[in-house]
Amino acid sequence: MDERGSYFNEGIGKDGPFDRLREECGVFGVFGYADAASLTYYGLHTLQHRGEESSGICTSDGRAFSYHRGMGLVKEVFDKDRLDSLIGDRAIGHVRYSTSGDSRLTNAQPLVFKTRDGDLSVATNGNIVNAPAIRRELEQKGSIFQTTSDTEVIAHLIARSEADVVTAAKEALRQLVGGFAFLIMTNDRLLVASDPHGLRPLAMGRIGDAYIFSSESCALDAVGAEFIRAIEPGELLVFDEMGCRSERFAPIERRALCAMEFIYFARPDSQMHDMNLHTARKRMGKQLAQESYVEADIVSGVPDSSISAAIGYAEATGIPYEMGMIKSKYSGRTFIQPSQELREQGVKMKLSAVRSVVEGKRVVLIDDSIVRGTTSRRIVKMLRDAGATEVHLRIASPPFKHPCFYGIDTPDSNDLIASSHSVEEICSLVGADSLAFLSHEGTVEAIGGAFAKEKNGGLCMACFDRDYPTELAAEAKTLGCGC
Ligand code: SF4
């Protein structure tokens, strides 16, 4: 990964300023809207938090594709002329992080292929854990891969099939193991699919007669689409001149939507499992307050993802919520990173404590998760340096102990502080006066309501409990995110 890329993303490297998990990717699709490219542009812009390394849009007018992909933010990759050149009433788009250290333009999506039956374009969010094995098999049969992205596997499986594209897509999807949300476009069709566990989110909306698809419902709102429903696990939706039909390529296995979407990744104005994410996070904060109350003067949340949980904690305890920390809106993209010396002098690129708020106060600080622990240590020190007399850290999720194989960039287990340290040890390492995590049961209780009768409330909790919903290929981890 280049220098630029590594600094743009908080999660990279032990020496980076923070140690957050990195979001995976975002997909957005349109079928039947006159200016599909512009709508996709605005949709991707809203999903930018899910991937900042590359962006791409492929459109179709029913006969031919137009497409453009580039490295960088949506607003950097596309201008008006570029969008005007993307013709058609259907489109698929993608924003991407690479997690395998390979951020080349060739891996930017949507991937586009020429097949004997016409053009084929694919955009995905997630990771196919058995992609290396399928790829090896296909290469032995003569397939030549253009990218290192495992998304290409499905294009080869579809292209090699003798069957029509819908049957071929179903057969291909059945071979894949992992967490994935796919948008697959041919010249005249759009196919939309979610893995049999529904690990990765995918929402469907409508504007008039046009259908819109998005990793998160917030992008449907942004383009004025009405939310209809989430794509069901194992479902394949087919859109063509005949209309729309829902088919199934696999039965719903154990429903297991990624819990980290609720905890951290998705925007608070999105909706998943029939629950608004801000509300879900407030519920987690309230639950946390019930489980680990501590006397304090103020409650603060680490911006932005922990603010909802902090409000919930404050409401449940009666301790006032205060803005004890500020996140710079403009720190995400700079070309130079402060040297270690400058950092030690207190040059803070991203987060700052608000001295006038925290000075002389006992602070309950709510964060969504602890990954390596380096961020928590810096934040606790920041608050103490700003005059906080006590810092009690409360984490609105269980200890993050195990890596993800479904498209989230996580460090090796060795670097996950909770995998090898007790809560007391972590508390001492991050320098807090006290530390508590939300329990596994409390997390499920707070956010698993829509599917309360299903295991873990229909959530994947594998990074907390190691109960992975799919089989895992031995080499899955080496591939990283497949988007
Ligand atoms: S392992 Fe964790 S991050 Fe990965 S899909 Fe499951 S809940 Fe989400």
Image (cartoon, grey):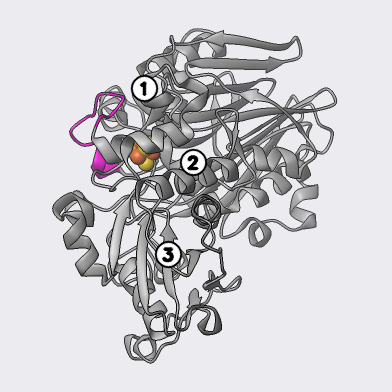
- Magenta span contains residue 476: yes
Closer to the camera, 27 or 464? 464
Q: Which residue is mark 3?
A: 365
Q: Is residue 129 left or right of residue 44?
A: left
Report how far apart the C-alphas of labels 2 and 3 lie in the structure: 19 Å
Residue 86 appears in view: no
Other-residue count near label 2 (Cα within 10 Å), few / some / many at <14 / 14–19 / ≥20: many
What amino acid is found at the position of numbered circle 2 in the picture?
Phe
Q: In this picture, is 349 found above or below 460?
A: below
The stretch in magenta equals: 467-479
Are the two marked residues, 1 and 2, in contact with CB atoms closer than 8 angstroms? no
Q: Quadrant of the N terminus?
A: bottom left
Residue 43 appears in view: yes
Q: Which residue is mark 2?
A: 262
Closer to the camera, 212 or 163? 212
Q: Quadrant of the C terminus?
A: top left
Cβ of mark 3 under 8 Å from ligand 1: the answer is no
Closer to the camera, 318 or 181? 318
Residue 254 at x, y percent in the picture: 37, 17
- Residue at left 55%, top 64%? 320
Other-residue count near label 1 (Cα within 10 Å), few / some / many at <14 / 14–19 / ≥20: some
Q: Looking at the magenta stretch, what is its main secondary structure? A: loop
- Mark nearer the viewer, 3 or 1: 3
Q: In this picture, is 365 found above or below 453?
A: below
Q: In the picture, residue 122 is in which quadrant?
A: top right
Report how far apart the C-alphas of labels 1 and 2 lie in the structure: 25 Å
Q: Is residue 36 left or right of residue 15?
A: right
What amino acid is found at the position of numbered circle 1 in the picture?
Leu
Ligand 1 image position (quadrant) = top left
Q: Which residue is mark 1?
A: 176
